[in-house]
Amino acid sequence: MTAVPAGPADSVPEPAARWTQLLFLSIGLSFAMAPSFAASAVAPQLRSDWGLGAMGLPVLTVAVLVGFSISAIVLAATGAPDVVPGPRLFAIGAAGAGLANLGFASSPRIWPARSRSGC
């Protein structure tokens, strides 16, 4: 058991890899969250290229949220976070979302591919 210093918090040395870990975590989270705002980033182009109406872009955003919700329910029901190590589960989810976005980019049917990007 490690003893806690009695002095102020300033006397505790900062971990050596703290900023490197925070950098990698920040980059990973940015990549993992990219599918949730991908449609908004190219909204004007999607609206003109696909002829989307007023509800077209909100439907794409809702499809992503439905995908996130389904993924969370499946993970909770299967207990995967208790069995699969966190970094591996994070990487699998990010890769699944990236592949779904790739399918979304080449899919003539928007809704199914967009909802899978919530993986």
Image (cartoon, rainbow, N blue to C red):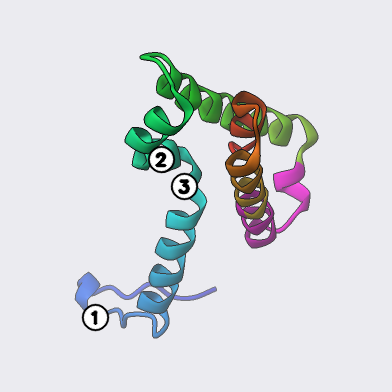
Please rate how many residues cluster around mark 2, counting C-alpha atoms within 10 Å: few if below 14, some from 14 to 19, many from 20: few
What is the x, y in percent for residue 32? 51, 52
Residue type of the residue flagged with mark 3: Met
Mark identifier at residue 24: none
Q: Where are the magenta residues, as a range?
A: 80-94
Residue type of the residue flagged with mark 2: Phe
Question: Where is mark 1, residue-wise?
Answer: 11
Viewer-side residue, 59 vs 20: 59
Residue in the picture at 39% in, 85% down: 16
- Give yes or no for residue 76 being in the magenta stretch: no
Residue 93's place in the image compared with 91, above or below, is: above
- Give yes or no for residue 81 being in the magenta stretch: yes
Of the residues tagged 3 and 1, which is closer to the observer? 3
Viewer-side residue, 57 vs 69: 57
Q: Are marks 3 and 2 in contact (CB under 8 Å)?
A: yes
The local secondary structure at tag 2 comes to helix
The local secondary structure at tag 1 comes to helix
